[in-house]
């Protein structure tokens, strides 16, 4: 926030524009919650930001063009997840990327400011191309999505972009596009700053101990999971395979129950005591898992309840997205006008009369 005089000369605190988003390719899980959603809600409620939260369906389509139904279904699931965790449409503009045509036009201008070899160097896109086994058949839209992401951010003059570590290359590329645009056409765009999860917090591993919690690995706890599903998943978690009898000394490192307790249990002393007991022998996995289940249930039950309430009126949820998209269009269209004028493609803004030549 910084002090700024308004039109009548009164001093007020200008809020920083926060912009972030998610691809709607499935429901969000507790890894998303810990890694970003929880922090977004905190930033929203601090009152220091003007948050724009985007459901990035265009970006999701760049590698799902043949499965649009998945994106359509996931859109409302992601919206429900947002509302469930406390993203509040009265404080944040929640909107849908495809409903903002200005983003696609900005993308067209920005594509000319980026070289193919620069795009090829983006390490996140490189890794995704490997993972998805595209080989030589990379959809051009997928290859260029970092440019479209620059449009997402700059359309709102986003200053603060809270994202996962894997998004750092996108921010770097956005800043390069901003600098290049501003130096060629004049100062219109704003350079964004990424806000990343605290160092060492890492990402939440899956139930099975895999480094990544993901739908395709079947090792995720979803915000939408009911209490029985949560319990079943906790009971299936990977612990210490050599901890056979209750009396055996157990391993804490790599034991997912302790990894999750470290993240979710506010009572750090209790976690420490459990670790010592487990290492000494005498603490059984079932008892330990029941405890983790309680900890998770305490955090997730209110989220689940709110999600169920919103899910009873999907019409209202779509209306929130529609209203958010109307607001987002106003802001993005304003930036687009400035961009068109800077490039000089605003031909019809001042049509010369015959007298003026
Ligand atoms: N690439 C982001 C992800 O995969 C989603 C996204 C699209 C995004 N546009 C954005 C994030 C703009 C921040 C800002 O999670």
Image (cartoon, rainbow, N blue to C red):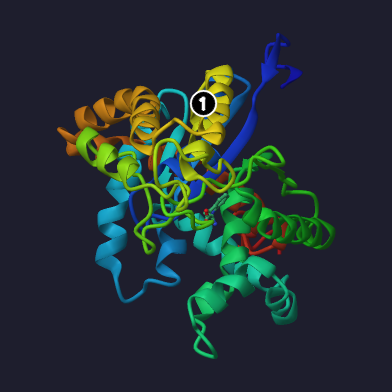
Could you tell me which residue is drawn at 49 percent across and 58 percent down? 210
Could you tell me which residue is drawn at 33 percent across and 27 percent down? 297
The residue lying toward the viewer, choosing from 157 and 317, is 317
State whether residue 223 is above or below residue 290: below
Let me know if residue 89 appears in the view: no
Q: For the view shown, which residue lies furthest in the right direction? A: 183
Which residue position is annotated with label 1?
274
Q: For the view shown, which residue lies furthest in the bottom direction? A: 136
Image-based side of 82 in relation to 200, left or right: left
Could you tell me which quadrant the N terminus lies in?
Answer: top right
Image-based side of 24 in relation to 5, left or right: left
Instruction: Indicate the quadrant where residue 145 lies.
Output: bottom right
Q: Residue 286: x percent and y percent?
A: 33, 36
State whether residue 336 is above or below residue 282: below
Q: Residue 46: x percent and y percent?
A: 58, 19
Could you tell me which residue is drawn at 71 percent across and 62 percent down? 343
Let me know if residue 226 appears in the view: yes
Q: Residue 257: x percent and y percent?
A: 46, 39
Q: Residue 269: x percent and y percent?
A: 58, 18
State whether residue 97 is above or below residue 326: below
């Amino acid at each position: 926030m910084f002090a700024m005089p308004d039109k009548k000369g009164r001093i007020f605190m200008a809020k920083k524009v926060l912009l972030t988003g998610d691809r709607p390719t499935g429901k969000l899980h507790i890894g998303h919650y810990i890694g970003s959603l929880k922090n977004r809600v905190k930033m929203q409620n601090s009152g220091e930001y003007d948050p724009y939260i985007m459901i990035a369906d265009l970006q999701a389509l760049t590698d799902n063009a043949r499965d649009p139904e998945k994106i359509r279904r996931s859109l409302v699931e992601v919206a429900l997840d947002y509302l469930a965790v406390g993203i509040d449409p009265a404080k944040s503009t929640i909107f849908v990327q495809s409903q903002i045509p200005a983003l696609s036009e900005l993308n067209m201008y920005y594509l000319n400011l980026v070289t193919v070899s620069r795009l090829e160097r983006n390490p996140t896109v490189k890794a995704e191309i490997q993972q998805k086994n595209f080989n030589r058949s990379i959809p051009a839209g997928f290859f260029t999505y970092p440019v479209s992401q620059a449009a997402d951010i700059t359309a709102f003059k986003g200053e603060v972009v809270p994202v996962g570590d894997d998004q750092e290359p996108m921010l770097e590329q956005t800043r390069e596009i901003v600098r290049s645009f501003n130096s060629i056409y004049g100062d219109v765009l704003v350079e964004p700053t990424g806000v990343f999860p605290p160092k060492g917090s890492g990402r939440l591993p899956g139930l099975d101990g895999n480094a990544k919690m993901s739908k395709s690995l079947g090792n995720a706890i979803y915000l939408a999971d009911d209490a029985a599903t949560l319990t079943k998943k906790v009971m299936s978690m990977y612990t210490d395979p050599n901890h056979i009898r209750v009396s055996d000394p157990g391993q804490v490192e790599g034991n997912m129950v302790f990894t999750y307790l470290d993240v979710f249990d506010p009572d750090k002393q209790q976690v420490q005591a459990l670790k010592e007991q487990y290492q000494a022998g005498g603490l059984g996995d079932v008892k330990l898992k029941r405890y983790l289940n309680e900890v998770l249930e305490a955090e997730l039950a209110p989220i689940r309840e709110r999600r169920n309430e919103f899910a009873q009126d999907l019409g209202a949820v779509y209306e929130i997205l529609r209203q958010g998209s109307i607001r987002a269009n106003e802001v993005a269209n304003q930036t687009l006008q400035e961009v068109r004028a800077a490039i000089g493609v605003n031909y019809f803004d001042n049509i010369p009369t015959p007298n003026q030549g």
